[in-house]
Image (cartoon, rainbow, N blue to C red):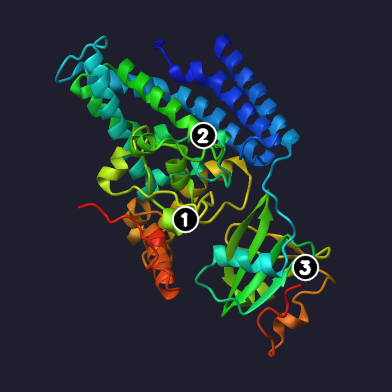
Amino acid sequence: MDKALLIQLLGSAVAVSLLVAIAAWARIPRPTPPLGARSARALLAEEFPDDPVDTLWIAADGAGLIARSGERALVAWRKGDGYVARDLAWSAALAAKTHNGFVVVKTADGAPRLALKDGVWPPPQLVSPNFVSGEAAA
Amino acid sequence: MKTFDPVQLAIPFFVLAVILEIVLARMGKADARYEAKDTAMSLTLGLGSSIAGAILGGAIFAATVWVWQHRIFTIPMTAIWAWVILFFAEDLTYYWFHRIAHERRFWWASHVNHHTSTHYNLSTALRQTWTGGVVGTWLLWLPLSFLGFPPAMVAIQKGISLIYQFWIHTEAIKRMPKWFEAVFNTPSHHRVHHARNARYLDANYAGILIIWDRLFGTFIPEVDEEPCRYGTVKNLASFNLFTNVFHEFVGMAKDVAGHPRHALGYIFGPPGWSHDGSRDTSHTLKAKWRARLEREGEAASPLNQEPAPRS
């Protein structure tokens, strides 16, 4: 490899590392407090504006949510200082497996681990036939 | 063959500007958000793009020289009028490249990684494609060399355009003077371009001059009532570098393999196109957004009106 090119590459790698270190040091990410009922619904309204929310469950650590909209599950989870949103069949969400106090929801291109309060999935209120919208939200 | 490369010269300025933006934001003097993993992704993509460019750059330059050898006119590199014409011609070429890169999936697959950040800061500007050479968007610039502009001249003007587009990737600058906003691409116009809000999709493709968007009906102004939310319609689930670079190509290949009869649609249709209409394109997302506005009775508000399309 050409020596000048190698030096340029190494210099660029050092510069990238320096900039990332400065960005980490600055601690200026977007504020992302744990989701509550209101912020969860606001997030759903942004990500799924045309989908009415029948029921809503928020992860124990506030870092994700699962909402029912008809026969679909709307899922959102934290990534960095933002959220990723996907949907899947409600039946698939209910059938998600648990592992070490988390429910692992398999979406088309991601499998978020959402913290459970008591290790039980699905929470009884999500499968209750008498469920009222918003009842499950913390 | 060594040519003057304004982008190489500008790299130290890029680094200092990113540091300045971070420090000013840290001091509360500028509106900017940085998340370390996101910044690492942007900068690594930038570095990888330089390497990918170096690998294919020689072949692309050779092809450009070959076209120039068969040129119609001989345009002198030293003439001011030639630079003025090239400035407009290159910028118009960039507009169409950028529009195609957003509105046709094959080229979107290459360009998308510039848009996968959910942040909008100076590091986002460096989040460049690795696959631009492979998908052949450089072909769009060949007519300039065929007309007679020397390849080095075209390369320099492309570099100037890239450097110009660096500073507009910021939230720290709200609005430029009105006359400037009317003519040039600005942070405000380009925030709209990077936004994933339905109202802002597929807009403001300009490089340096925003006049092309105004002329071709793709201009959408930023409105304070609806702040831009950045990223792609479906934000990526991962910070994995290779997922960032190749995810849309992988998705496209899966779609083609699953529905070979509809391959052309999945490759050259708009992003989000599907043979059964089960997915959303920018067009359907905007239609749903308009329908929501009407349902909510907000359509009457002038703030919610899109500019009328130009004929």
User: At which x and y percent is residue B9?
Assistant: 49, 15
**CA–CA distance in space, label 2 to label 3:** 40 Å
Res B254 label: 1
Q: Amino acid at mark 3?
A: Thr
| Helix, strand or loop under label 3 | strand
| Helix, strand or loop under label 1 | helix
Give the farthest residue toward the left: B72
Res A72 label: none
State whether residue B168 is above or below residue B284.
Answer: above
Q: Are marks 2 and 3 in contact (CB under 8 Å)?
A: no
Neighbor class of circle 2 (other Cα within 10 Å; few <14, some 14-19, many 20+) is many
Read off the chain for label 3. A
State whether residue B228 is above or below residue A88.
Answer: above
Q: Amino acid at mark 2?
A: Ala
Q: Residue at x 56, y 33 (%)?
A: B122
User: At which x and y percent is residue B262?
Assistant: 34, 60
Label 2 sits on residue: B125
Q: Nearer the viewer, residue B78 or A64?
A: B78
Give the farthest residue toward the bottom: A130
**Dot in front, 1 or 2:** 2
Label 3 sits on residue: A98
